[in-house]
Image: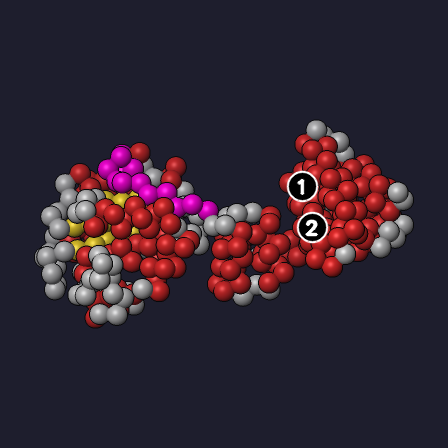
Amino acid sequence: MDEANYLEKIQPIVFRQLQNSFKHGRSAHAYLFEGDQGTGKAEMALWFTKHLFCLNLTNDLPCETCNNCMRISNHEHPDVVEVAPEGQTIKVDQIRALQSELAKSGFETVKKVVLIHEAEKMNTSSANSLLKFLEEPPANFMIILETQALGKILPTIRSRCQIIHFQGLSAEQLKEQLITQNQLSHKTAELLANLTNSYTKAVEISNDEWFNDAKDTVIQWYKYLEKKDPQAFIYVQKKLVKVFKDKAQQQMAFQILTFYFKEKRDELLQLQPTKAAAYNHVLEEVLLASQKLEANVSFQTIAEQITLHVVFV
């Protein structure tokens, strides 16, 4: 039951909701799984599908080892049909082919399950074609649509589905996903998990060449500040303001700086608690800086004030 343990860990509410619906025979014919990438939508869809085909259910949980469970895991079961975008969209021909496929009886059982990945990428024609199908679904049929953008799904489709909301990952879960799925270093994954709770956004940031330069820029500023080096003041003028140009980037500069000062403070709390107090003062300065930026104080002025308060006080 390793898969069940993993899914219960990352999505406990969804896990219990779906498990209870199966246990009490209240499964819907159409579900809409909505949430950020990396939150377990696709894995949960396959796991829930296994409930319908598993040959050795134990305590109403799929065994994960029977022939049906293994084929579903490997995307090879003939009565589980998966649809994904061809290029940038899910085309109407794909939905029509799906309808034709579902008009036939199941190859091995009377049941059929359809999984539509990235359902927000259906074009208008394919969405309308699916809508007609949902209005008169065949017997012994279940469809699960997965989406990262609920607002892009037709309201008439949403109204015909039971919507299941997937919560964003915790910082620790997000860090683990970034390390295992994207091969990021522990430090980079930890930083990204402090910048956003969205897996999609974290991956987007990590792939941005600007981010890597920006991160290195803030690290150098941090090093000057930590050593109380007056060079930090010149660095603000010569480098920092040239890298961080718009408000969103400038807020990120303060978030990155906060991350490194927090890390140093937490390290000192274990070894030299009296020295850690000084870092609380710095963190208060950086938090205030974010508020000043929102109040339209110039980024350079705020960064120079931080430098003055840290280096020369």
Mark 1 Cα-neighbour bin, 10 Å: few <14, some 14–19, many ≥20: some
Residue located at (31% from left, 64% from top): 1
Which residues are drawn in magenta?
156-168
Residue 262 tag number: 2
Q: Residue at x 17, y 65 (%)?
A: 55
Say whether residue 161 is magenta. Answer: yes
Dot 2: element: helix
- State the residue at coordinates (22%, 57%): 60
Q: Which amino acid is tagged 1?
A: Gln
Q: Earlier in the sequence, mark 2 or mark 1?
A: 1
Left or right position of 19 against 294: left
Q: Is 74 left, or right, of 297 in this rendering?
A: left
* Residue 105, quarter of the rendered image: bottom left
**Residue 9 quadrant:** bottom left
Q: Tell me if mark 2 has few (under 14), some (14-19) or many (20+) residues whose alpha carbon lies within 10 angstroms of its own.
A: some
Residue 122 located left or right of residue 98? right
Residue furthest to the top in view is 295
> Does the rendering let one see residue 239?
no
Taking the spot 34% from the left edge, 39% from the top edge, the residue there is 153
Residue 141 is situated, as x and y percent measured from the top left of the image, at: 16, 50
Magenta stretch: includes residue 17? no
* Residue that numbered label 1 is attached to: 251
Label 1 residue SS = helix
Q: How many marks?
A: 2
Please name which of the two marks, 2 or 1, marks the residue nearer to the observer: 2
